[in-house]
Image (cartoon, rainbow, N blue to C red):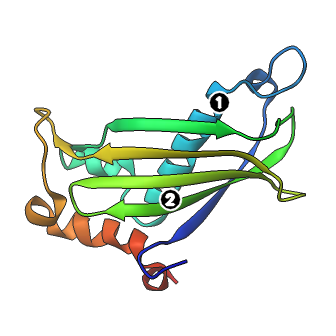
């Protein structure tokens, strides 16, 4: 891992409603888990979505993708590893790796890209317009700051 990348892990227990009749997780749930992991990490560093929205900042998803490797079943526990691949104050790019918590087997890999907008929907630079928020989010790229 380079100095410009940081990893964070969120753990999720598969619920019955997330599965199909065969007890296998429906593919759409992996995207939801990406969001859970992202929300968890942002909250952990002190800049959860609710905090950003209170300040008038929204962060929509620009793109999201997933590659499914192996099946996940009802009541499995998975770790969703989140890695920051790019953050520059304007865009945030993330990579996700979902693994079985017991075996470490990769279940899914994905990525998402986000931007930052004001309440009117206009793009903003956190670095310029909200330096205090930029400083907090920039910690995602520097894990030693969080330890």
Disc 2 marks which residue?
41
Residue 6 position in % (x across, y down): 50, 72
The number of numbered discs placed on residues in the rendered structure image is 2
Q: Earlier in the sequence, mark 1 or mark 2?
A: 1
Among all residues in the image, which is located at the extreme top? 21
Residue 49 position in % (x across, y down): 37, 47
Separation (CA) of disc 1 from disc 2: 18 Å
Q: Secondary structure at mark 2?
A: helix
- Left or right side of 112 for 101: right
Tell me the tag on residue 126: none
Residue 68 position in % (x across, y down): 70, 37
Dividing the picture into quadrants, the one containing residue 140 is bottom left
The residue shown at (48%, 49%) is 39
The residue shown at (44%, 82%) is 3
Dividing the picture into quadrants, the one containing residue 89 is bottom left
Q: Nearer the viewer, mark 1 or mark 2?
A: 1
Vertical side of 6 occupied by 106: above or below: above
Vertical side of 7 occupied by 108: above or below: above
The residue shown at (15%, 36%) is 119
The crowding category of the residue bearing disc 1, from other C-alpha atoms within 10 Å (few below 14, some 14 to 19, many at least 20), is some
Query: Quadrant location of the N terminus?
Result: bottom right
Disc 1 marks which residue?
29
Residue 69 position in % (x across, y down): 75, 41
The residue shown at (23%, 47%) is 116
Vertical side of 143 occupied by 88: above or below: above
Vertical side of 41 occupied by 54: above or below: above
- Left or right side of 73 for 108: left
- Left or right side of 47 for 74: right
The crowding category of the residue bearing disc 2, from other C-alpha atoms within 10 Å (few below 14, some 14 to 19, many at least 20), is some
Q: Secondary structure at mark 1?
A: helix
């Amino acid at each position: 891992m380079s100095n410009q990348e940081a990893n964070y892990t969120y753990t999720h227990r598969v619920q019955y409603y997330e599965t199909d009749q065969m007890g296998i997780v429906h593919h759409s749930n992996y995207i939801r888990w990406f969001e859970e992991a992202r929300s968890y990490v942002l909250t952990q560093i002190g800049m959860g979505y609710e905090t950003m929205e209170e300040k008038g900042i929204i962060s929509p998803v620009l793109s999201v993708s997933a590659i499914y490797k192996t099946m996940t079943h009802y009541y499995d526990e998975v770790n969703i590893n989140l890695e920051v691949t790019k953050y520059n104050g304007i865009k945030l790019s993330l990579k996700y790796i979902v693994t079985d918590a017991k075996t470490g087997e990769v279940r899914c890999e994905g990525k998402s890209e986000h931007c930052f907008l004001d309440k009117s929907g206009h793009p903003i630079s956190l670095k310029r317009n909200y330096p205090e928020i930029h400083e907090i989010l920039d910690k995602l790229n520097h894990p030693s700051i969080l330890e």
